[in-house]
Image (cartoon, helix red, strand yellow):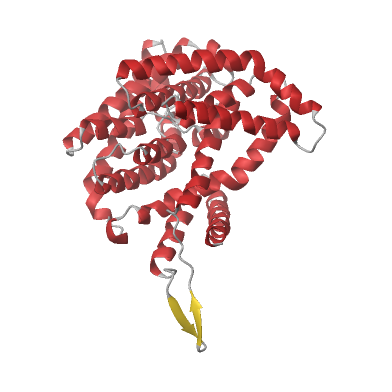
Amino acid sequence: MNVILLIALALLFARLFGYLFDQIKQPAVIGEIIGGILLGGIGVWIFTGQTIQLFSYPVVLPNLDFSSEVFTIFAELGILFMLFISGLQTSLSKLKKMGRTSTLSAVGGVITPLLFGIGVGLVFDFSYQESLVIGMILVATSVGVTVRTLLDMHELDTDVGVTILGGAVIDDVLGILLLAFFLGFDSPIVIGIKIIIFFLIFLYIGLRIIDKVLQLGERIHLPKALLSITLAIFLFYTYFADQFGIAGIIGAFVAGLIIGNTTRFRRIIDDVQTIGYSFFIPLFFVWIGASVWAFAPEGIVDFSSIGFLVIAIIIVAIIGKVLGCGIGARLAGLSSRESLFIGVGMIPRMELALIIATTAIANGMFASPVHEYQILICTVLLAIVTTLLTPLLMKVVHGKKLVLK
């Protein structure tokens, strides 16, 4: 029964702090993470499973262990739902039509932060494998806050706005593929072959038969039968990707990509988002926040141990995107100011960065618990700082009479 209390408190804190941050025009997920940090702290400080006397009656305080196996499973389902929904919202036809500018910007925005992240890791005495994880954390862009800022500026439909959106989609896909590649336990060649085979088989088969399978769901006259079939496909793909040794989140993304391009996509997207965003995804972000305490040595959060490291990671995360995306946009023919605006718009890190960090930790890619703790804290702070900083930087650059075509 303890896990029921954990879930109830997690959902309550997620929605309360998410709402508070939304009211100050900041992403709700930051509030959910901070809610998790506070809730995890309360669990460490107060609710420890000990017995106290209340009016002469013994009362056993619950043990709020957010690192428990059951709660972790719920949180990991939140990761899978995020990748599934991301796939649902990614159009295959639009991916094929992504312009040269978006592609060059995305590739530059992947290579430069990846190399910078590896360099930072090596400078701070992380192993080469651990440094690769740091580089991957810096790759993916969280475009949600950028979209909101572009809408406020009435620039979403401009060439620069479309380039940012296209580049964010492409570098997310590249980031997911990199994660699959580096999480493999075989040689790089074998892993590459597995990824290719998985995509060829499951993408090809899926595009040919998934629509027919979903049609079966329509013929079953039971409440939400189509949704049940959809979720079953999503979980099957997750399972088989894991069995291929290329990470379950890849399967979740591919399942979303396929189903999102079927004729029945619009009949299930709202229900999937309702399940994901109302239950599983908030639990993931609260779990991230609470994990700050779970991974802390002896339950003591010591920010001084990551001071210079987190500063270095945030600096190279910003410079890497501005430089990499900016150079790519410049090579595609955009002006210096337009290229700068694109680079700034690609700075935010959030969901995928946290997914990469937690997945790498879960797969034992770090040599010690101290390194796991340091990278988790750095990733959380990176997400918060870049998400808060990007709108301000975009407005500063935009105020320089930027010419957007």
x, y percentage for residue 402? 45, 24
User: Could you say which quadrant of the image residue 336 lies in?
Assistant: top left
Give the left or right position of residue 156, taking residue 213 as reference: left
Q: Residue at x 26, y 44 (%)?
A: 371
x, y percentage for residue 229? 68, 30
User: Could you say which quadrant of the image residue 114 lies in?
Assistant: top left
Q: Is residue 119 above or below residue 57?
A: above
Q: Is residue 320 above or below residue 103?
A: below
Camera-side residue of 165 and 36: 36
Camera-side residue of 309 and 290: 290
Q: Is residue 108 above or below residue 64?
A: above
Q: Residue at x 26, y 43 (%)?
A: 311
Q: Is residue 108 above or below residue 31?
A: above
User: Could you say which quadrant of the image residue 192 lies in?
Assistant: top left
Q: Is residue 314 visible?
A: yes
x, y percentage for residue 391? 46, 38
Give the left or right position of residue 14, taking residue 386 as reference: right
x, y percentage for residue 110? 36, 23
In this view, the residue farthest toward the right is: 221
